[in-house]
Image (cartoon, rainbow, N blue to C red):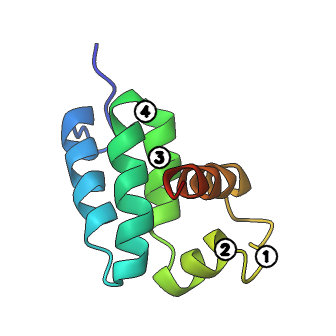
Amino acid sequence: MADQSPAGEDILMRRKRLRYRAWHRGTQEMDLILGPYVDAHLDRLDGAALDRLEAFIAEEDVLLLKWVMGQEPPPPSADSELIAELVAFRQSSSR
């Protein structure tokens, strides 16, 4: 049986929506950080990982950019594991 969100949304539709949201953030900087990361990882994410990504993407771009760029430490409530993955991905992609 396919993973589904609580609203009954198909996992393929969730992935499609997340890909769009990652590339259309409102700030080009976050588009260029989240878009490639999501393109590289999205097809392997299960329902729980999609939940984490959706919660992360719900944060404001200004805050996300500061956390990912190391300009400001994320609060304890932030998904520090996901932030670390984004930072590592960004650094490996820029080489």
Q: Quadrant of the N terminus?
A: top left
Q: Which residue is mark 1?
A: 73
Looking at the image, is mark 3 or mark 4 earlier in the sequence?
4
Determine the secondary structure under disc 3.
Answer: helix
- Determine which of the numbered discs, if any, sits on residue 67 in the image: 2
Mark 2 or 4: the one toward you? 2
Estimate the spatial distance between the alpha carbons at disc 2 and disc 1, rounded to whole Å.
Answer: 6 Å
- Does 87 sit above or below residue 3? below
- Determine which of the numbered discs, if any, sits on residue 64 in the image: none
Q: Amino acid at mark 4?
A: Leu
Determine the secondary structure under disc 1.
Answer: loop
Estimate the spatial distance between the alpha carbons at disc 3 and disc 2, rounded to whole Å.
Answer: 19 Å
Estimate the spatial distance between the alpha carbons at disc 3 and disc 4, rounded to whole Å.
Answer: 10 Å
Q: Residue at x 34, y 80 (%)?
A: 28
Q: Are marks 2 and 1 in contact (CB under 8 Å)?
A: yes
Q: Residue at x 38, y 68 (%)?
A: 32
Q: Which residue is mark 4?
A: 45
Q: Amino acid at mark 2?
A: Trp
Q: Amino acid at mark 1?
A: Pro
Estimate the spatial distance between the alpha carbons at disc 4 and disc 1, rounded to whole Å.
Answer: 26 Å
Q: Residues within 10 Å of mark 4 (few under 14, many from 20)?
A: some
